[in-house]
Amino acid sequence: MASITATQFNLVYDVLSFSLATMGATTIFLWMRVSSAAERYKSALIISGLVTFIAAYHYLRIFNSWTEAFEWTKDGTVQATGIPFNDAYRYMDWLLTVPLLLIEIVLVMNLPDDEIFSKASKLGVASALMIILGYPGELVLDENHLGTRWFYWFAAMIPFVYIVYTLLIGLADATNSETDLTVRKLTKGVQWLTVISWCTYPIVYVFPMLGIARDDIVVYIQLGYSVSDIISKCGVGLMIYRISMAKSVALRRGSEQTPLLA
C-alpha cells in the first residue's frame, strides 16, 4: 500500500464520508417523492433511488476499507496497517449502478414501450461490458506495466463511445419530440450531464500514466472518482426527478382537461 501523509488521509476520509452522506440523502429524497409521480414515471424514481442506495452501501465499504488500511501513529503521522485497501468495491458498484443509471434515463424519455426495452437492454449490456473491460487495467499501477493499463483503457472506451453516441445522437429524435420546452431542456440536460460527468472517469483512469507520483495516485483516484460519482448519480438522479415531476404534472393537466365520456 502506498504511503500517504496525514493530510492526504484526512482528505480522502472526508470526501468518502461526504460522498456516503450525499448518496444516502439523495436516496431518501427520491424514494419519498415516488408517491408524487405519475404511475408511468414511478419506476424511474425508484431506480434512481436504487442507484444512490447501492452507491451509498459501497461507499460505506470503501470508507471502512480506507480506515482499515491506515492507522495513526503516536507521533501524529499515518502509516499503512498492512491490510490492503479494497477499491474493487467501486467497480462492483459501477457494475450494478451504471446500467441502472442509463435505464432510468431511458424510462423518462418519449419512447414507445418496445423501444424503451430495446434501448435499455443495449445500453445496459454496453455499460456492463465497459466496466468489465476497464477493471483489469485499474489494478495496474506499476510504472513498468502501464502499457497494459492503456490497453484496457482503449478496450473500455469502445462501449463508452457507443453509449455517448446513443445518448447524444441515437436518442435525439425522442428528445426533440418532447412538446413541452421545459421537459425538452431538462431531457437534453440530463443527457449532457451524464456524458460530461462520465468523461471524467477515463481521465481519472489515466492518472497513473501521467507521471504522478505513485504515493499520490491512490489519493487522486479516490478524489476524482468520488466527485464523478456524486455528479453522475446524485446530480443525474435529481434531474430525473425534475423530469418525472414535470411530466407527471403535464399528464394530470391533460387528464383534467379531457372530458369524461358518458
Image (cartoon, grey):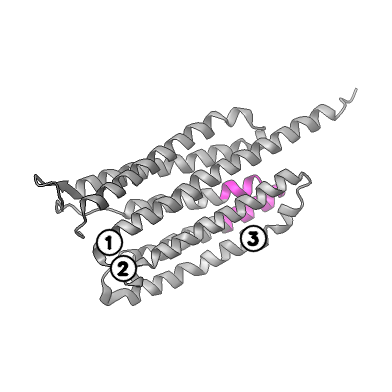
**Residue kind at label 3, given as amino acid type:** Leu
Q: Is residue 235 above or below residue 252?
A: below
Q: Which mark is residue 216?
A: 1
Q: Is residue 117 above or below residue 141?
A: above
Which of the two marks, 3 or 2, is nearer to us in this view? 2
Label 2 CA crowd tier, 10 Å (few <14, some 14–19, many 20+): few
Q: Earlier in the sequence, mark 1 or mark 3?
A: 3
SS under mark 2: loop
Dominant secondary-structure state across the stretch colored magenta: helix
Question: Gap in Å between the C-alphas at discs 1 and 3?
Answer: 35 Å
Q: Are marks 2 and 1 in contact (CB under 8 Å)?
A: yes
SS under mark 1: helix
Question: Gap in Å between the C-alphas at discs 2 and 1?
Answer: 7 Å
Judge from the rendering whether residue 83 lies leftward or rightward of residue 182; answer left or right: left
Tell me where residue 55 appears, x and y as whole percent.
41, 44
Judge from the rendering whether residue 94 lies leftward or rightward of residue 169; answer left or right: left
Judging depth in this view, the residue of 164 and 13 nearest the camera is 13
Label 3 CA crowd tier, 10 Å (few <14, some 14–19, many 20+): some
Judging depth in this view, the residue of 240 and 115 nearest the camera is 240
What is the span of residues highlighted in magenta in the rendered image? 103-122
Q: Which mark is residue 168?
A: 3
**Residue kind at label 1, given as amino acid type:** Asp
**Quarter of the image that includes the N terminus:** bottom left
> Circle 2 is placed at which residue position?
212
**Residue kind at label 2, given as amino acid type:** Ile
SS under mark 3: helix
Tell me where residue 129 appears, x and y as whole percent.
47, 62
